[in-house]
Structure formats: structure tokens, C-alpha cells
């Protein structure tokens, strides 16, 4: 069997935030910087839109990257606000670095994640509720 040179890694994050992003222009800039910080390249976007529908109010931002996509959805009506973050790539990335950045930039109170290898199935690589104290981030 021929070995595939690409990897198929998928990080799914659910977080709770005291300070979720709400500004479309700011989150587009943040997403560009984020993509660069994990060694990826933007192919299209990022695109962002804030939705003002009661019960579903929040921000969505998406970037098409050379190796797949990155998407963030926020809901800012609940307290704390909810953030769902999704990175799928055929390139390597470090799930802990991504979770640290989200925790630092959006003042999280909780972060959970699943990291999957999707090359031949949906195999768990890692996941769980992360411990902020070991990262030396501001107290949350």
C-alpha cells in the first residue's frame, strides 16, 4: 500500500470566554496572524460576519488555508460566552500551542478539545480539559 505524504489532523475546541471577539475587522486580523503563527498559509479570506439574531448572536470567522480550513464561531449572549474553534489541516500543527493562544487572547474560563487523526479513520490523538496553571497565563 502506498503511504500518503499528507497528514490529516483535526483539532476541535470548545471554550468559554469572559471576553469573546465581537469586531469583524479585528477578528480577521487576528485570524491572519494566527494562521501565520502556526506555520500555515492563507489561501482565501479570512472572512468574518457578526450575526445579531437573538439567541444566536455572535461572530463567525473562516479562513481557507493551503492545507484545509480554520473556523471560529462565538456566541456572546451566554455568560460566559461560548467559542467553538476548528482547525483541520493536512499539515502538522501543535494542539497545545493553539489552545494556549486561544486561552490568552480571549480570556477563557474553560477550554476542552479533541485532537483527531483522520487519515484512516477518526482516531483520538489527545483531548480533555486543559490546565491553565502550567502555561503561566494570567489567572482565569
Image (cartoon, grey):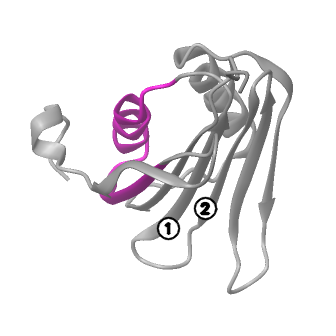
Question: Residue placed farthest to the bottom in the image?
Answer: 55
Q: Nearer the viewer, residue 20 or 103?
A: 103
Q: Is residue 78 left or right of residue 131?
A: right
Q: In this view, does 28 lie to the left or right of 82?
A: right
Query: Which of the 4 image quarters holds residue 26?
Result: top right
What is the x, y in percent for residue 34? Answer: 57, 25
| Residue 70 in the image: above or below residue 60 | above
Kindly identify the residue that appears in the image at 75 percent across and 25 percent down: 67
| Residue 48 in the image: above or below residue 41 | below
**Which dot marks residue 74?**
2
- Which element type, helix, strand or loop, lies under badge 2? strand
Instruction: Please give the residue where the numbered disc 1 appears in the rendered image.
Output: 82
Q: Are marks 1 and 2 in contact (CB under 8 Å)?
A: yes
Kindly identify the residue that appears in the image at 61 percent across and 52 percent down: 121
Badge 2 local density, few (<14 within 10 Å), some, or many (20+)? Answer: many
Q: Is residue 47 left or right of residue 4?
A: right
Kindly identify the residue that appears in the image at 78 percent across and 20 percent down: 42
What is the x, y in percent for residue 87? Answer: 61, 41
| Residue 104 in the image: above or below residue 11 | above
- Which element type, helix, strand or loop, lies under badge 1? strand
What is the x, y in percent for residue 80? Answer: 39, 71
**Mark 1 / mark 2, whichever is N-terminal:** 2
Asked whether 38 falls inside the magenta stretch, the response is no
What is the x, y in percent for residue 50? Answer: 77, 59
Amino acid at each position: 500500500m502506498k503511504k500518503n505524504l499528507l497528514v490529516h489532523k483535526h483539532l476541535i475546541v470548545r471554550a468559554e470566554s469572559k471576553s469573546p471577539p465581537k469586531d469583524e475587522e479585528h477578528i480577521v486580523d487576528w485570524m491572519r496572524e494566527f494562521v501565520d503563527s502556526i506555520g500555515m498559509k492563507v489561501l482565501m479570506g479570512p472572512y468574518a460576519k457578526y450575526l445579531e439574531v437573538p439567541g444566536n448572536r455572535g461572530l463567525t470567522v473562516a479562513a481557507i488555508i493551503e492545507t484545509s480550513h480554520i473556523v471560529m464561531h462565538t456566541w456572546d449572549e451566554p455568560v460566559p460566552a461560548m467559542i467553538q474553534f476548528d482547525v483541520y489541516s493536512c499539515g502538522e500543527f501543535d494542539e497545545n500551542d493553539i489552545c494556549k493562544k486561544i486561552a490568552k487572547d480571549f480570556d477563557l474560563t474553560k477550554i476542552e478539545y479533541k485532537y483527531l487523526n483522520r487519515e484512516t479513520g477518526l482516531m483520538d490523538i489527545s483531548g480533555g480539559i486543559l490546565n491553565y496553571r502550567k502555561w503561566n497565563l494570567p489567572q482565569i
